[in-house]
Amino acid sequence: MKYNYLIALLCLSAAGSDQEVHFDYDRSTNFNAYRTYRWIDQTPVQIGVQLLDRDIKRAVDEQLAGKGLRRVDSGGDLLVSYHAAISGETQFDGFGGWGPPWLGNWGDTRVTTSTIDIGTLTIGLFDPANKQLVWRGAASKTLDINRDPDRNYRTLEKAMGKLFKNYPPGLGKP
């Protein structure tokens, strides 16, 4: 069951809406000092999600390499981890109970509810020397189950591109 939700998380592609991204960072950090990074796993990767784990890391690796960072197996100026989560939002659909009463629909209220799954992929960059989080970004999207792994990966790449668009922060500022 959890495997299906993680597969759904990869499918950050619902019709008609883009990924929502947010990031924050430590404003006292000199991001230009970072040249290397290493992945850390906060929890063991289950067998059923190993491919997804590799896809997420590959998509992030592509972004960080494009920013001039090099992945290493030990040490590293930065430590990188991710967390995937699914949350449900209640959507209310209905009509009636609105408009002027002379239209004849006043009080005739029909409302239905449904739960929409929202997937969030959060990436954290930690400075091991200071033992502090220095950058955190999250991409959220209404989930749309898509069984095409190539399309899913392209969507993941797009989400990570949007998330890392402003990394390193402050680039280009005086």
Image: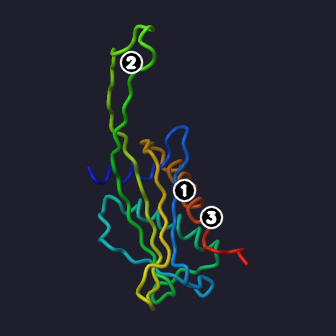
- Of residue 106 and residue 80, the one placed in the foreground of this image is 106
Q: Residue at x 45, y 15 (%)?
A: 100
**Residue type beneath disc 1:** Ala
How far apart marks 1 and 3 lie (CA) works out to 10 Å
- Residue indicated by mark 3: 165
Query: Label 3's element?
Result: helix
- Residue indicated by mark 2: 96
**Residue type beneath disc 3:** Lys
Query: Label 1's element?
Result: helix
Query: Label 2's element?
Result: loop
Residue 159: mark in rendering: 1
**Residue type beneath disc 2:** Gly
Q: Residue at x 28, y 53 (%)?
A: 2
Q: Determine whether 64 is above or below 78 in the image.
A: above
Query: In this image, 167 relative to 174: left or right?
Result: left
- Of residue 84 and residue 153, the one placed in the foreground of this image is 84
Which circle's residue, 3 or 2, is located before the other in the chain?
2
Q: Where in the figure is residue 44, as x and y percent of width and height? A: 29, 71
Q: Residue at x 33, y 24 (%)?
A: 111
Question: Depth-wise, is mark 3 or mark 2 nearer the camera?
Answer: 2
Instruction: State the quadrant of the C terminus.
Output: bottom right
